[in-house]
Image (spheres, grey):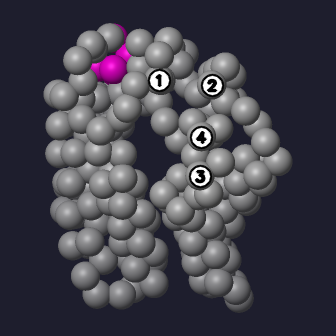
Amino acid sequence: MSNTKKILTQPLRIFIVAMLIGLLMKILGWPMASQVMFVSFTTIGLLYGLRFWKKPIKQFKDYNKLILVLFWVINGVLSILDVQHTIFIHLVIAISFVLWFVLEGAGYLIHGNQHTKNSTLQLLWNIAMVFGTLAIIAGSLMKILNWEYALSLLVLGIVVVCAYVFRDTFAVEGLKNEDTNGEELQA
């Protein structure tokens, strides 16, 4: 497999971070949270659709990822608009996620490709991502239970995940050359 240059990577990352910030705004009860999330979801769907359209060679797994992303976006938009009975959308998301995991997810998640060198810095980033994800989950649950420090933990988790998403943007040149974990491989 050759690692070809992905288009629209940075704009997609920016709007994923904007969506996470909108989620945080919604949890904190700040105004304009729904609008930020709506614009983010819509833009992610449009950008990923454009990215897919510009891809020269499309395989089944690429169509599956398109379905996964677009139905995730549709589900997000419909949730913001308080549309009920989205079980079909959830079912399509679940099936396409299982297909993605079977086709390439396990290798993608454990970084089993030959293009990846697991340096100490990359290991620390991966550990930070795990702790950031756990902090978001724990902070959300603590917020539901109205426990102390829930918002601090939630904000910390979202900041860590946002930093992980942007790690390639602000990384040192040496890390950019050896780390392709944030990139997808294309045949």
Cα separation, mark 2 vs mark 4, equals 10 Å
Q: What residue is drawn where x is 29% and y is 66%? A: 37
Question: Mark 3 or mark 1, which is nearer the start of the sequence?
Answer: 1
Residue 125 point in image, percent of width and height: 70, 54
Cα separation, mark 3 vs mark 4, equals 6 Å
Q: Name the amino acid type tagged 1.
A: Asn
Q: Secondary structure at mark 2?
A: loop
Cα separation, mark 3 vs mark 2, equals 16 Å
Q: For residue 177, what is the image quadrant?
A: top right
The residue pinned by badge 4 equals: 177
Asked whether the residues under the numbered discs 1 and 3 touch, taking CB atoms below 8 Å apart as contact, a structural biologist would say no
Q: Secondary structure at mark 3?
A: helix
Cα separation, mark 1 vs mark 2, equals 8 Å
Cα separation, mark 1 vs mark 4, equals 12 Å
Residue 86 visible here: no
Question: Mark 2 or mark 3, which is nearer the start of the sequence?
Answer: 2
Q: Is residue 48 above or below residue 26?
A: above
The residue pinned by badge 1 equals: 3
40 within the magenta span: no
The residue pinned by badge 2 equals: 115
Q: Name the amino acid type tagged 2.
A: His
Q: Is residue 11 above or below residue 31?
A: above
Q: Secondary structure at mark 1?
A: loop
The residue pinned by badge 3 equals: 173
Q: Name the amino acid type tagged 4.
A: Asn
